[in-house]
C-alpha cells in the first residue's frame, strides 16, 4: 500500500483509468435512447465502486455545516455537467470531446479573476488563449468556423464543471476520500433521476442491455479516475500534477485513433492536443 502513497503512482494510475474512462464512456452511451437514464446508471455504478473503495480508509466527516451546504451546491453543478457530458460524449468523437473538455481550465481562470479576485498573470491568460485557440483550430474547416449543438453541449458541460470545482475546493480533504467521491456521484444522480423523470425500471433495463460490460467498466474507471486524481493532488502540488496530467489529452486522441478508429483529421487533433497541453502548462507557471 505504501506504493499508493506516492504521487507518481497515483498520477500514472489516474492517466491509465482516465483513458479507460473516456473510451469506455463512448462505447457505453453510443446507442442509448435516453441519455439521462444512462447518466444515472453510470453515476450509481461509480457510487457503488466508491463505497467499496471507502472501506480501505478511515472515515471522517466535517463538523462545519457550511461544508455540507457547499457540497450540495457543487453537486447541483456536477449534475448538470454529468447530464450534458453524456449527450456530448454520445455524439462527439472521444478525441474531440477530450480537447473541448479542457475549456474548463479557461473557465476556471475567468472565475478566479472575476469571483475570487485572483491577480492578473500574463502566463495564465496566454495559456487560456492557447486552449481557446486549439479549439477554434479544431473546428475551423474550409475557411469557416462552426460548432454543432453537441460541441456547444460539451462546452456547457465544461462550464458547469468549472463552477462545481470552484465551489467545492478543499472539501474532499475533510472526508474519507472515496466516500466524498461517492457523494459527488450519488447526489447528482438523484437530481437527474428526479428532473429527468426516470423510473427505476428504466435503469434496470438499460443495465441489462447489450452494453452492460461497458457500463461496469465506465462506472468503476470513473471512480478510480477521480480517486487517483485527487490523491495525486493531495500528495504533490498543482505545478507538478497539472502539466503531467495534461498529457491525457494527447493520449486520449492517440488511443481513440487506434482503438475507436477516429482517424479523420488525425493530424489536426494531435496538433490541437499539443497546443492545449502547452496552454495548460502555462496556466500553472
Image (cartoon, grey):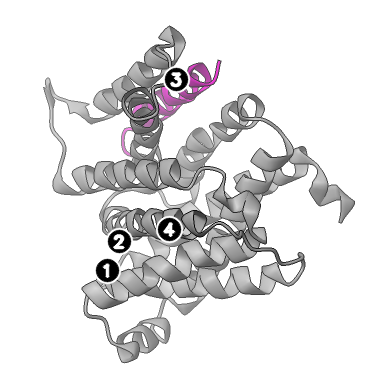
* Mark number, residue 35: 1
Q: Quadrant of residue 188?
A: bottom left
Mark 2 or mark 1: name the one nearer the start of the chain.
1
Residue position for label 4: 69
3 and 1 marks in contact (CB < 8 Å): no
The magenta-colored residue range is 263-285
2 and 1 marks in contact (CB < 8 Å): yes
Mark 3 or mark 1: name the one nearer the start of the chain.
1
Residue position for label 2: 83
Kind of element beneath mark 4: helix
Select label 4 or label 2 by which is in front: 4
In the picture, measured across the screen, residue 158 lies left or right of residue 165, that is left
Check the image and name the residue furthest to the bottom.
201
- Whether residue 32 is in magenta: the answer is no
Q: Quadrant of residue 182?
A: bottom right
Taken as a whole, is the magenta stretch helix, strand or loop?
A: helix
The CA distance from mark 2 to mark 3 is 27 Å
Most foreground residue, 12 or 74? 74
Residue position for label 3: 279
Check the image and name the residue furthest to the right.
2
Residue 18 pos. (x, y %)? 55, 50
Residue 7 higher or lower than 223, as above or below: above
Mark 4 or mark 2: name the one nearer the start of the chain.
4
Residue 220 pos. (x, y %)? 57, 67
2 and 3 marks in contact (CB < 8 Å): no
The CA distance from mark 4 to mark 3 is 33 Å
Amino acid at each position: 500500500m505504501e506504493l499508493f502513497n506516492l504521487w507518481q503512482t497515483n498520477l500514472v494510475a489516474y492517466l491509465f483509468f482516465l483513458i479507460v474512462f473516456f473510451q469506455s464512456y463512448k462505447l457505453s452511451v453510443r446507442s442509448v435512447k435516453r441519455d439521462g437514464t444512462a447518466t444515472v446508471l453510470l453515476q450509481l455504478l461509480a457510487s457503488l465502486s466508491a463505497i467499496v473503495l471507502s472501506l480501505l480508509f478511515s472515515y471522517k466527516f466535517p463538523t462545519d455545516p457550511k461544508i455540507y451546504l457547499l457540497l450540495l451546491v457543487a453537486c447541483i453543478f456536477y449534475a448538470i455537467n454529468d447530464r450534458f457530458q453524456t449527450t456530448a460524449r454520445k455524439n462527439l468523437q472521444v478525441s474531440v470531446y477530450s480537447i473541448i473538455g479542457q475549456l474548463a481550465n479557461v473557465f476556471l481562470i475567468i472565475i478566479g479573476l472575476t469571483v475570487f479576485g485572483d491577480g492578473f498573470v500574463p502566463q495564465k491568460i496566454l495559456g487560456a488563449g492557447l486552449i481557446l485557440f486549439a479549439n477554434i483550430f479544431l473546428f475551423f474547416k474550409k475557411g469557416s468556423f462552426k460548432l454543432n449543438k453537441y460541441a456547444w453541449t460539451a462546452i456547457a458541460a465544461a462550464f458547469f464543471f468549472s463552477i462545481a470545482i470552484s465551489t467545492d475546493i478543499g472539501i474532499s480533504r475533510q472526508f474519507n476520500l472515496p466516500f466524498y467521491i461517492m457523494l459527488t456521484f450519488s447526489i447528482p444522480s438523484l437530481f437527474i433521476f428526479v428532473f429527468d423523470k426516470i423510473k427505476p425500471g428504466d435503469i434496470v433495463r438499460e443495465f441489462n442491455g447489450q452494453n452492460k460490460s461497458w457500463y461496469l467498466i465506465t462506472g468503476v474507471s470513473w471512480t478510480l479516475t477521480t480517486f487517483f486524481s485527487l490523491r495525486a493532488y493531495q500528495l504533490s502540488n498543482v505545478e507538478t500534477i497539472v502539466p503531467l496530467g495534461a498529457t491525457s489529452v494527447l493520449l486520449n486522441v492517440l488511443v481513440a485513433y487506434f482503438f475507436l478508429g477516429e482517424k479523420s483529421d488525425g493530424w489536426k487533433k494531435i496538433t490541437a492536443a499539443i497546443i492545449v497541453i502547452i496552454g495548460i502548462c502555462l496556466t500553472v507557471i
